[in-house]
Image (cartoon, grey):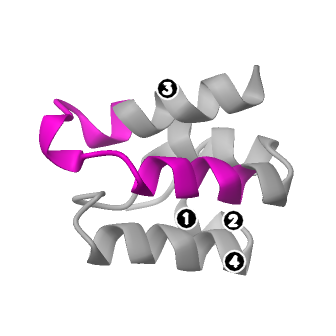
Amino acid sequence: MEQKKNEMGVKDLSHLIQFSVKNLQATGHLDKEPGSNACRLLNNLPESKALEALEKFSSCDASIMRSKEGYLIGILRKTNG
């Protein structure tokens, strides 16, 4: 399947952010790779702020999240704000 031009994936992010996302998947904080919207938000943040947001997300209780990716997007938007 060909990726649309405006879509982003984890592979488009810096290596440190990719590593952090893979760790979130390994620990169960994320069930799958983040979608294009979350990746775009991560990419638009300075790397240090993106890593800070991912760290904040990792400290949240994943069992109370209805949508893990939605919760991550909320944290990224607040960080971006």
Q: Quadrant of residue 44?
A: top right
Where does label 4 land, which residue?
Answer: 16
The picture places residue 54, in percent across and down from the top left corner, at 55, 54
The picture places residue 55, in percent across and down from the top left corner, at 55, 58
Q: Is mark 3 on a helix, strand or loop?
A: helix
Q: What element carries label 1?
A: helix
Regarding residue 5, the answer to whether it shows in the image is no
Q: What element carries label 4?
A: helix
Residue at 48% x, 67% y: name it.
21
Mark 3 or mark 1, whichever is nearer to me = 3
Q: Say which mark, if any, is on residue 57.
A: none
Q: Which of marks 3 and 1 is nearer the N terminus?
A: 1
Where does label 2 land, which residue?
Answer: 13
Mark 3 or mark 2, whichever is nearer to me = 3
Q: Real-space Cα distance between discs 3 and 1?
A: 18 Å
Q: Is residue 19 above or below residue 32?
A: below
Q: In this view, does 32 lie above or below 26?
A: above
Q: Which of marks 4 and 1 is nearer the N terminus?
A: 1
Say left or right for 15 vs 3. right
Secondary structure mostly seen in the magenta stretch: helix
Residue at 62% x, 47% y: name it.
53
The picture places residue 78, in percent across and down from the top left corner, at 64, 23
- The kind of residue tagged 1 is Val
Q: Real-space Cα distance between discs 3 and 4?
A: 21 Å
- The kind of residue tagged 4 is Leu
Q: Is residue 16 above or below residue 43?
A: below
Q: Is residue 79 above or below residue 69?
A: above
Q: Disc 2, disc 1: CB below 8 Å?
A: yes
Where does label 1 land, which residue?
Answer: 10
Q: Real-space Cα distance between discs 4 and 2?
A: 8 Å
Q: Say which mark, if any, is on residue 74.
A: 3
